[in-house]
Image (cartoon, rainbow, N blue to C red):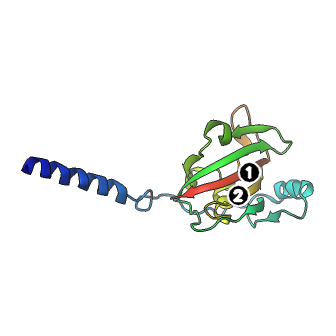
Amino acid sequence: MRTRLFFMLAFSFLVLAACNKSSNSGNCNFTPTTAVAPAAEIAVLKAVLDASYTQHPSGIFYKITTPGAGITAEVCSDVTVKYLGSLINGTPFDSSYQRSPNGATFTLGQLILGWQIGIPLIKKGGSIILYIPPSLGYGASGGGAAIPPNSNLVFTIDLVNVQ
C-alpha cells in the first residue's frame, strides 16, 4: 500500500513539475531587434503598396487583418503560427497550411527579423500581412532554391498561440 502511494505521489509530482515549466522565460538569450532596412529597400516596397499598408519604423510594411486578443508575443515567446510565404511577384515558397494544418511552433527570436518585428504587432488569434525588405528577411544569401538573394517577401500570418 505504501509503495503504491509513493508511486502515485511521485507520478503526481513529475506531472506538476512538467506543467509548471516555463517555455523560455528563464533561459532566453534573444534581445529585441533594432534593425532598420536601407532606404532603397523601403522605397521599392513603398512603390508597389497602396495606402492600406502601414510602414513600421524598421522598414517592414504591414496590414493587420485581425488584431487578436490577449497575449502579445515577445522575442523569447514560443509562437504557433499558420502562414503563407511568397515572393513579391506572388510566387509561393512556403506554407504551413499544407505542412502543418494546426500551425507550426517557433521561438520568435530564432526567426527572420521581419517576423520578430511584425508578429508582436498583433495578439494571439490575430492575423497580419507583412511585406519584408531583403535585409529584414533572408538578405543577400537568400533562402535556398526557393528564395533568391535580396528578395522582398510577403507573409500572411495567423498567430494561433503565444507561450
**Where is mark 2, residue-wise?**
127
Residue drawn at 85 percent across, 55 percent down: 45
Residue at far left of view: 2
Q: Position of residue 128 (x, y in %)?
A: 73, 58
Q: Earlier in the sequence, mark 1 or mark 2?
A: 2
Answer left or right for 149 relative to 71.
right
Label 1: few (<14), some or many (≥20) within 10 Å? many
Viewer can see residue 59: no
**Where is mark 1, residue-wise?**
156
Residue at far top of view: 145
In the image, residue 76 sits, relative to residue 3, either above or below, namely: below
Q: Position of residue 5 (x, y in %)?
A: 13, 52
Q: Nearer the viewer, residue 102 or 55?
A: 102
Residue drawn at 63 percent across, 56 percent down: 159
Residue drawn at 75 percent across, 55 percent down: 130
Q: Nearer the viewer, residue 15 or 56?
A: 15
Q: Secondary structure at mark 2?
A: strand
Q: Disc 2 residue type?
A: Ser
Q: Position of residue 66 (x, y in %)?
A: 72, 62
Whether label 1 touches label 2, CB < 8 Å: yes
Q: Position of residue 96 (x, y in %)?
A: 65, 41
